[in-house]
Image (spheres, helix red, strand yellow):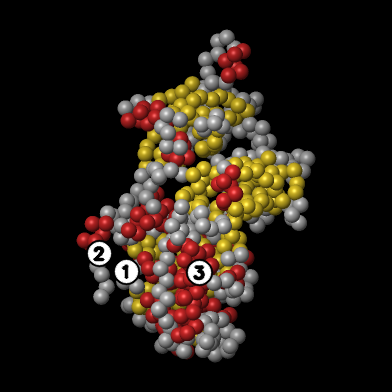
């Protein structure tokens, strides 16, 4: 979902004669961000399948994954990625990409195919197999676009990718489904079958669209598959009588899965059984066995455990219901930034040119402040020796008021930052776990209210790889259970490769004890990638995931937005 943006172009920085420069930043952001707030024409689902992927070697097939990227300001940014399908040269991915379609824009897309090594879902050690570039308009106009995948050097191989587009209707409701099976056929000689279930929607033209593929339950003829959520649009295109074809397979490591059986149903049939409190089950039929075997009954039965409608609320539902974005800034004051009095320092206050810390702060803060009614932002520093005793601190208030670290607006944060520089001594190390824990403490209090009133965003600006990686991973895993997101912007020219581990885009982040994050809440971006772009490009990149993170948290908790009347009656306005 695109965040609507209002940029206050009149806001100026009156400190250190930066007025004209800071105004230019705001005006640039206002002009460039205009397209983000343009109304979305419609939402489009993209399904992806590949054909003819070359084997890695004679003994194994590739483990493919497709990464979707979108171009903004001349740079490619990852939007989402499919699941990894093991041992498949012609994968049909169950992951569905949901994108906003703007008729008035040229939305450039890039689909990258990677071969993911076993035991690792990240791209760092993956093999690049090819890419296809197109526009969203091309896919929408053709509905089904098939093109060759180009390898390095833009040479075409034998593999191709097919992208199918479908416009979403207005129904945003989801259905939660849970299936199990009993007495499935045993397809393995030395063990029991390893079954998984696929659900296909039968389209008006007779084609089939994969709706969901369950996990594989190993060595079990009576599996219980995990429940899953799917939109009614995806499941049946809003047509409750549309046929659904369900197929059960026995998974094989070589990708040649054995067919167990199939059955047909409709959403209407499943929902009626749920409403009447009846258990519904289907015979799983193998047509070949049915024709050849006289006494054949079935290849097992599949049971619907539950079918439940879930109302899914949007980011704007929560914002318009009164949810406030509590924006907190944390700034790196370690010695590696350089002496602020030296023009080479990342903290140098130039009379006419804001440093990278200020640019990143303004670009992100300007957007977040529109969703905070009191416009008061806590600002902290870490890694400095602070007065009066000059001991190192990793979570001190930049305004030196520990009782009230809040600053009035983004301008107030800028002033507090510039005023504190001459009073502190840059030191180290670069520890960010304490500040994550501090904000998480406030988010924890909000969580216990069980209302959608405050969601916390922590912006961390740092010039290097952190030194407390284990503690930071632990803090992020804990924070993933809270109404909170963390944005990390790497300032300067350091090698931030090791920081990518914190961004859940490249595999699942785990604590040192092995506990995985409940949801992906971290977005890491190196500022150097945006040095020659507008502030809007940085803001869009780091904030793009926030709306979905807000929605995912509250929907997972079953917390509804407060209605407008409830919000207005309980809201307190700042003078």
Q: Secondary structure at mark 2?
A: loop
Q: Nearer the viewer, residue 371 or 242?
A: 242
- How far apart are the alpha carbons under marks 3 and 1? 24 Å
Q: Quadrant of the N terminus?
A: bottom left
Q: Nearer the viewer, residue 96 or 282?
A: 96
- Vertical relation: 341 (above or below) 134: below
Residue 258 visible in the current orientation: yes
- Vertical relation: 3 (above or below) 492: above
Q: Quickly name the residue at label 2.
A: 571
Residue at 46 percent of width and 27 percent of height? 265
Q: Quickly name the residue at label 3.
A: 32
- Outermost residue to the top: 294
Residue at 21 percent of width and 61 percent of height? 569
The first of marks 3 and 1 along the sequence is 3
Q: Quadrant of the C terminus?
A: bottom left
Q: Nearer the viewer, residue 175 or 27?
A: 27
Residue 183 visible in the current orientation: no
Q: Secondary structure at mark 1?
A: loop
Would residue 371 appear left or right of 487 to someone viewing this image? left
Q: Secondary structure at mark 3?
A: helix
Within 10 Å of the Cα at label 3, are there few (<14), some (14-19), or many (20+) other Cα atoms? Answer: some
- Outermost residue to the left: 569
Within 10 Å of the Cα at label 2, are there few (<14), some (14-19), or many (20+) other Cα atoms? Answer: few
Q: Quickly name the residue at label 1.
A: 373
- Vertical relation: 188 (above or below) 109: above
Q: Foreground mark, 2 or 3?
A: 3
The first of marks 1 and 2 along the sequence is 1
């Amino acid at each position: 979902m695109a965040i609507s943006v209002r940029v206050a172009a009149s806001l100026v920085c009156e400190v250190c004669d930066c007025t004209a420069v800071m105004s230019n930043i705001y005006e640039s952001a206002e002009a460039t961000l205009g397209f983000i707030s343009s109304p979305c024409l419609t939402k489009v689902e993209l399904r992806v399948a590949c054909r003819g992927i070359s084997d890695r070697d004679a003994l194994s097939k590739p483990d493919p994954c497709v990464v979707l990227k979108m171009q903004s300001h001349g740079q490619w940014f990852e939007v989402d990625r499919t699941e990894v399908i093991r041992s498949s040269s012609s994968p049909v991915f169950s992951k569905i990409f949901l994108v906003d379609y703007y008729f008035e824009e040229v939305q450039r897309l890039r689909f990258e195919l990677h071969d993911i090594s076993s035991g690792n879902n990240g791209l760092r050690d993956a093999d690049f197999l090819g890419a296809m570039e197109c526009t969203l308009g091309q896919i929408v106009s053709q509905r089904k676009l098939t093109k060759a995948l180009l390898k390095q050097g833009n040479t075409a191989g034998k593999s191709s990718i097919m992208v199918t587009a479908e416009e979403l209707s207005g129904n945003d409701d989801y259905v939660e489904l849970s299936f199990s099976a009993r007495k499935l056929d045993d397809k393995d000689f030395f063990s029991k079958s390893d079954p998984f279930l696929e659900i296909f929607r039968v389209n008006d033209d007779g084609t089939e669209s994969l709706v969901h593929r369950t996990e594989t339950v190993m060595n079990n003829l009576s599996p219980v598959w995990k429940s899953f959520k799917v939109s009614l649009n995806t499941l049946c295109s809003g047509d409750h009588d549309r046929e659904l074809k369900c197929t059960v397979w026995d998974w094989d490591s070589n990708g040649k899965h054995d067919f167990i059986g199939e059955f047909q149903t409709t959403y209407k049939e499943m929902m009626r059984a749920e409403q009447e409190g009846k258990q519904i089950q289907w015979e799983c039929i193998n047509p070949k066995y049915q024709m050849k075997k006289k006494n054949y009954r079935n290849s097992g039965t599949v049971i619907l455990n539950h079918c439940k409608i879930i109302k899914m609320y949007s980011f704007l539902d929560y914002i318009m219901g009164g949810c406030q974005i509590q924006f907190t800034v944390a700034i790196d004051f370690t010695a590696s930034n350089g002496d602020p009095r030296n023009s080479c320092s990342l903290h140098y206050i130039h009379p006419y040119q804001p440093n990278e810390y200020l640019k990143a702060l303004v670009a992100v803060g300007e957007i977040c402040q529109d969703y905070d009614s009191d416009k008061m932002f806590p600002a902290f520093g870490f890694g400095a020796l602070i007065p009066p005793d000059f001991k190192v601190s990793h979570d001190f208030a930049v305004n030196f008021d520990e009782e009230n670290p809040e600053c009035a607006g983004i301008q107030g944060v800028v002033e507090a930052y510039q005023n504190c520089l001459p009073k502190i001594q840059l030191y180290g190390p670069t520890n960010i776990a304490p500040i994550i824990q501090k904000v998480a403490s406030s988010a924890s209090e909000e969580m216990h209210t069980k209302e959608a009133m405050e969601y916390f965003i922590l912006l961390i600006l740092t010039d290097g790889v952190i030194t407390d990686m284990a503690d930071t991973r632990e803090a992020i895993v804990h924070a993933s259970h809270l109404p909170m997101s963390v944005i990390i912007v790497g300032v300067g020219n350091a090698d931030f490769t090791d920081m990518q581990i914190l961004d859940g885009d490249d595999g699942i982040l785990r604590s040192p004890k092995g506990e995985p994050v409940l949801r992906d809440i971290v977005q890491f971006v190196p500022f150097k990638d945006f040095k020659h772009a507008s502030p809007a490009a940085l803001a869009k990149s780091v904030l793009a995931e926030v709306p979905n993170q807000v929605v995912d948290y509250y929907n997972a908790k079953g917390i509804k937005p407060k209605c407008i009347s409830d919000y207005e009656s309980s809201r307190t306005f700042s003078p």
